[in-house]
């Protein structure tokens, strides 16, 4: 990753200069150099945007809190976070002193690395023609962080799982452009898909905000039903979610994360309570598979933002750990409300 290496090299030189001015040891320089890069390398597992974290104090403190929570989940001591925070503060100082903000740094070095796999593959194939998966992977990994599953994902892109066959021909190990006329259309279709995802993301944000307002404006007035509730109506493709049910769950949880009640977040500006998010343990999109409503307190859990991201975007083992812990607490009351499911089926819903 040429651009990243340039930034890292400049940061090391900055640390060496700080060592000269402040009498830091070589070991301290090496430690800060390594620790500051840890969240970038693990950004996907942590559920953070590394570069966005340096845009303001709020984003920066959120990254630190997520990192700290992650260390706690791994069983590390409370002092583990200190050297990482110091290193990240040094990196933030470097960014501000040398580039007057992270926006200038990313504009200079990282604009090309923000490109999607599809765009990068197309660009390379247009310039080089037929090539191998290994050559493509070497090129892409030099531009962006591909992670442990990068090569596997790359193969999926060009072999139809992500509709890549509309653009690419693949005959292991070779890849080439199928028809240049299809490229613009397919990328346009994918762009529309990203727009839909963004709209879904906005719906989720609005739902969480509405819950916060429910807590603040009218308090918890949800009346728990004594019998199983038939599934509710839906508008277009989405089932209606009752913010009062979710607000009730957050109140019952004491505004703490139900996976780990020691997880600390922040005080919500809207509700004045510690911020946690409502999550349907059995995802609401599977409502059609059930006779009774999934939008009930028994199927809603309160999670800190980090655990909420992890249950959606974490590794297979990470998701399984959280889902299993939550399901063990809810299995009986779900069954009492006419909702029958086993842990294997539930985990399958998150794949």
Image: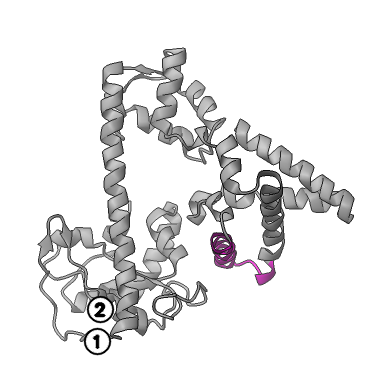
Report the magenta stretch's main SS: helix
Residue 346 occupies which quadrant of the picture?
Answer: bottom left
Q: Which type of secondary structure does the marked residue at label 2 adopt?
A: helix
Residue 259, visible in the rendered structure: yes
Question: Which residue position holds label 2?
Answer: 244
Determine contact: label 1, label 2, CB under 8 Å: yes
Can you tell which mark lies on residue 221?
1
Residue stretch in magenta: 57-79
Q: Residues within 10 Å of mark 2 (few under 14, many from 20)?
A: many
Residue 297, visible in the rendered structure: no
Residue 169 occupies which quadrant of the picture?
Answer: top left
Q: Is residue 114 left or right of residue 327?
A: right
Camera-nearest residue between 201 and 319:
201
Look at 29% across and 75% down and name the residue there.
246
Residue 98 occupies which quadrant of the picture?
Answer: top right
- In x, y percent, where is residue 142? 57, 30
Q: Residues within 10 Å of mark 1 (few under 14, many from 20)?
A: few
Q: How many marks?
A: 2
Look at 27% across and 41% down and name the residue there.
193
Establish if 216 lies above or below 96.
Answer: below
Look at 44% across and 65% down and name the residue there.
305
Q: Is residue 254 left or right of residue 32?
A: left
- Quadrant where the image shows the N terminus: top right
Tell me, yes or no, whether the highlighted magenta stretch contains residue 62. yes
Camera-nearest residue between 299 and 220:
220
Q: Is residue 171 left or right of residue 143?
A: left
């Amino acid at each position: 990753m040429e651009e990243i290496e340039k930034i890292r090299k400049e940061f090391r030189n900055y640390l060496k200069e700080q060592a000269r001015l402040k009498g830091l040891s070589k070991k301290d320089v090496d430690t800060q150099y390594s620790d500051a890069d840890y969240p970038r390398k693990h950004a996907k597992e942590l559920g953070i945007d590394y570069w966005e974290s340096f845009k303001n104090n709020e984003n920066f403190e959120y990254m630190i809190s997520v990192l700290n929570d992650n260390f706690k989940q791994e069983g590390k001591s409370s002092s583990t976070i200190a050297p990482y925070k110091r290193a990240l503060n040094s990196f933030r100082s470097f960014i501000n002193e040398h580039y007057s903000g992270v926006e200038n740094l990313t504009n200079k070095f990282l604009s090309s690395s923000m490109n999607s796999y599809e765009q990068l593959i197309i660009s390379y194939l247009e310039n080089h023609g037929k090539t191998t998966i290994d050559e493509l992977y070497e090129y892409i990994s030099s531009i962006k962080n591909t992670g442990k599953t990068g090569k596997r994902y790359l193969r999926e892109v060009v072999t139809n799982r992500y509709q890549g066959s509309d653009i690419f021909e693949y005959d292991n190990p070779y890849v080439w452009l199928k028809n240049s006329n299809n490229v613009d259309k397919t990328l346009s279709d994918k762009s529309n898909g990203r727009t839909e995802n963004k709209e879904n993301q906005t719906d989720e944000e609005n739902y969480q905000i509405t819950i916060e307002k429910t807590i603040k404006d009218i308090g918890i007035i949800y009346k728990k039903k004594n019998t199983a509730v038939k599934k509710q109506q839906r508008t277009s493709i989405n089932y209606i979610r009752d913010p009062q049910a979710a607000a009730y769950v957050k109140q019952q949880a004491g505004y703490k994360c139900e996976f780990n009640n020691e997880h600390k977040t922040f005080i919500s500006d809207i509700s004045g309570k510690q911020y946690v998010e409502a999550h349907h343990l059995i995802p609401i999109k599977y409502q059609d598979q059930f006779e009774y409503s999934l939008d009930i307190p028994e199927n809603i859990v309160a999670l800190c933002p980090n655990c909420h991201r992890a249950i959606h975007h974490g590794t297979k083992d990470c998701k399984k750990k959280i889902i299993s812990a939550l399901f063990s607490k809810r299995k009986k009351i779900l069954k009492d409300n006419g909702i029958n499911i086993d842990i294997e089926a539930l985990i399958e819903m998150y794949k």
